[in-house]
Amino acid sequence: MTELPDLEELDIPDPSHLDAEATLKIYQALRPVMPPDSPALHQKADRLTDCLDAFDAFILDGFGVINVGMEKINGIDEFFRRAELDGKPVVILTNAASAPSAVLAEKYLRWGLPVTAQHIVSSRDALVAVLPAIHQRSEFLQLDSKTQLINGLTSSANANSELFDTVEGFVFLGSSGWGEDNQALLEHSLLQRMRPVLVGNPDVSAPHPHQFSAEPGYWMARAMKSVPGLRPRWLGKPHLPVFQLAVDKVNQLAAVSVPNHRIAMVGDSLHTDILGGAAAGLGTILITSYGLLRAHDVDQLCAEMQIFPDWQVRLI
């Protein structure tokens, strides 16, 4: 079992005090269960459109690249327009696992972006792929009761300790509606009897205009501190299964096989987007002005954490 000494020593704040600095510390404490770092060119550009000639296809994160909270980022329309004119497929890869891709696509369509369900891969897709057949899923409890239920899973709506204790596994997709009481039920149940926990959203937080929300990766880090030996199965970024789904989607849209190194993973997180993209053999582009790192000295952070993108880009 992978040891996590930094997580054991880390003082994790409550959700109301979660900020970028605390988020980065949690990610760093989880590094032993993440892909290893890879060499990178670490070139710089002013805008994402400046990187169009360097790649044949693009995989975009959502939060911090397309939007911050529910606000679309200026320049993303132009990037989609230029990519389409150049015949370069664009896929969205998101750890937002609370709803199927068709539902996620509605937001982008409302913003006037050329995005349908055929352009989206979510960590929910990766998680569903490893679940048993629908008729065998009832022994798994989907923890987040306000998230759209996956067919066959048992809902945790109005769940009590008895239900937590009798199921044979847990699925965690989103944190809407999740709080301290729910967390205490989960941790107590796992302390009594260890069972699998499948996490469809490894993000620790998501950037909003004035705060950072606590995502499933945050709650799982806390559970791992409280429950000795707990090692969830992570199905989203930075872990490989979801990147393979995204590459498959790129190749479907391109109607040819695009070499992985000619596909760029574009994101705002060193730990989920850059580590994961590089481990999947993709090129990597870090966007610095909108998301997790928007108030930080990114050069210093890259050096401290020894995670470097192929391109560091300021604006969309």
Image (tube, rainbow, N blue to C red):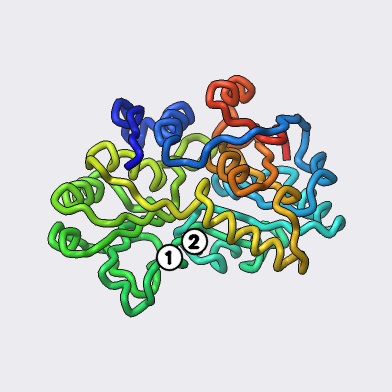
- For the point 47% across and 58% down, the residue is 97
- Cβ–Cβ under 8 Å for marks 1 and 2: yes
Rendered image quadrant of residue 31:
top left
Rendered image quadrant of residue 171:
bottom left
Tag on residue 236?
A: none
How far apart marks 1 and 2 lie (CA) works out to 7 Å
Q: What element does badge 2 sit on?
A: helix
Q: Is residue 303 visible?
A: yes
- For the point 43% across and 28% down, the residue is 25
At which x and y percent is residue 134? Answer: 37, 77
- Rendered-image quadrant of the N terminus: top left
Amino acid type for the residue under numbered disc 1: Val
> Residue under circle 2?
126
Q: Can residue 19 be seen in this view?
A: no
At which x and y percent is residue 192? Answer: 13, 51
Q: How many marks?
A: 2
- For the point 41% across and 45% down, the residue is 215
- For the point 36% across and 60% down, the residue is 146
Q: Residue furthest front?
A: 1
